[in-house]
Image (cartoon, rainbow, N blue to C red):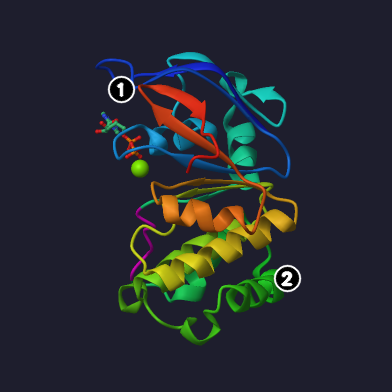
Amino acid sequence: MIELDDVGYSYGGGELLSNVSVKLAPGSFHFLTGPSGAGKTTLLKLCYGALTPTSGAVRAFDADMRGFDRDQMAMLRRRIGVVHQDCRFLDHLPLADNIALPLIVSGRDMAQESANLRELMTWVGLTERADARPPELSGGERQRAALARAVILSPDVVLADEPTGNVDWEMSMRLLTLLVELNKMGKTVLIASHDLALIRAAKSQVQARVLRIANRRLQLAGADL
Ligand SMILES: Nc1ncnc2c1ncn2[C@@H]1O[C@H](COP(=O)(O)OP(=O)(O)O)[C@@H](O)[C@H]1O
Ligand SMILES: [Mg+2]
């Protein structure tokens, strides 16, 4: 699905990531861990084409992203759903419209998509909050809304950046369950998180590989978590 081949990345200073090679196989479940500032968000951005590597290559769906034109990039964005770390919304729009925004932007027929939207709102448990404005939402509601928005175009891959960053343990488990369900539906999932308790909890629910960024390199973490 997504493949990084000897990728290096630098924002202009020293190299932040070096010699990163990894394959996210179809249907796989990965965690990406490492201390704050290690480069987790940067690595996710390389995976969905928001950043271009300074060296090496990123392949998505068997094609080198370097050669992508605007249309291919737009297609890529539809096939990769991203839950951003700061999950921003348009505060003046009701929650349901915020979640539906990717449908509108990609020109889908909203009448045809209304069942899809309703089903998704039910799945994340936000049906009652459809008319609420984003500033009224709790942290857990925002994260679930961000997840719903990320998957509304039925992407093949879901990348979630610290999806449980600002929520309590119970809500973390609920979000994890949703991500595991997506994986069971066949989606490739990658979760960036420094929460080792979350990762341990996940291991009883799903076969997950744990990748760790340490000293600019990406390594496969052992069973010692
Ligand atoms: N746009 C940017 N320009 C320059 N430096 C950046 C930028 N974004 C992130 N960084 C730096 O890159 C490092 C890794 O950031 P990030 O990928 O957000 O790490 P993590 O998600 O693991 O906390 C940090 O030191 C951060 O300050
Ligand atoms: Mg980050």
- Density class for disc 2 (Cα within 10 Å; few <14, some 14-19, many ≥20) is few
Which quadrant holds the N terminus? top right
Helix, strand or loop at mark 2: helix
Q: Is residue 41 left or right of residue 46?
A: left
220, 38: nearer the viewer? 220
- Density class for disc 1 (Cα within 10 Å; few <14, some 14-19, many ≥20) is few
* Residue type at tag 2: Gln
* Residue type at tag 1: Tyr
Helix, strand or loop at mark 1: loop
Q: Are marks 2 and 1 in contact (CB under 8 Å)?
A: no
Q: Quick check: can you spot residue 50?
A: no
Which residue is depicted at the point 71% across and 32% down?
61
Q: Position of residue 137 (x, y in %)?
A: 36, 76
Q: Which residue is mark 2?
A: 112
Main SS of residues in magenta: loop
155, 44: nearer the viewer? 44
Which residue is depicted at the point 51% across and 53% down?
200
Q: Which mark is residue 1?
A: none
Which residue is depicted at the point 44% across and 16% down?
8
CA–CA distance between discs 2 and 1? 43 Å
Which residue is depicted at the point 51% across and 87% down?
128
Residue 208, compared with residue 90, is above or below; it is above
Q: Position of residue 149 (x, y in %)?
A: 53, 61
Magenta-highlighted residues: 86-91
Q: Position of residue 209 (x, y in %)?
A: 60, 40
Q: Is residue 164 left or right of residue 23?
A: left
Q: Which residue is mark 1?
A: 11
Mark 1 Cβ inside 8 Å of ligand 1: yes
